[in-house]
Image (cartoon, helix red, strand yellow):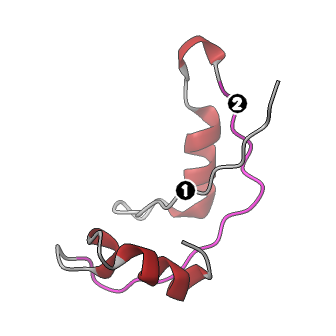
Amino acid sequence: MKVHQVVLTIIDFDDIGPEAICETLADASYPNDCIRPSIRSLKSADIGVWDDDHPLNRSDTSKRELERLFGVA
């Protein structure tokens, strides 16, 4: 058996907040109970007003924007 660490980027369009995001991911019903995520930490950053030209919405700028916001891509 293996363990895998996955870093996700979640854009919170409905403003549910960090706690609800963790609960939603942990409580989701995954087929055949194939995975059981355990959220150890969650970082948040204000990204301003969202529009189609936002750096996180563009493949050519999203990596650089994630590095700017969180230090990782």
Q: Quadrant of residue 36?
A: top right
Q: Disc 1 on helix, strand or loop? A: loop
Q: Quadrant of the N terminus?
A: top right
Left or right placement of residue 20 versus residue 12 in this view: right
Extreme residue in the right direction: 1
Q: Can you give x and y, in whole percent of width and height, for residue 37 in the image?
A: 69, 38
Amino acid type assigned to the residue bearing label 1 in the image: Leu
The magenta span reads 35-50
Front residue (pair 15, 35): 35
Does the magenta-highlighted stretch encompass residue 22?
no
The residue carrying mark 1 is 8
Q: Disc 2 on helix, strand or loop? A: loop
Q: Quadrant of the C terminus?
A: bottom right
In this view, 59 is above or below 26: below
* Residue depicted at x 63% and y 50%: 22
Q: Can you give x and y, in whole percent of width and height, for residue 64 in the image?
A: 44, 82
Q: Can you give x and y, in whole percent of width and height, for residue 32 in the image?
A: 59, 11
Does the magenta-highlighted stretch encompass residue 39?
yes
In this view, 30 is above or below 65: above
The residue carrying mark 2 is 36
Q: Can you give x and y, in whole percent of width and height, for residue 66 in the image?
A: 49, 77
* Residue depicted at x 19% and y 76%: 51
Query: Mostly what secondary structure, the magenta segment?
Result: loop
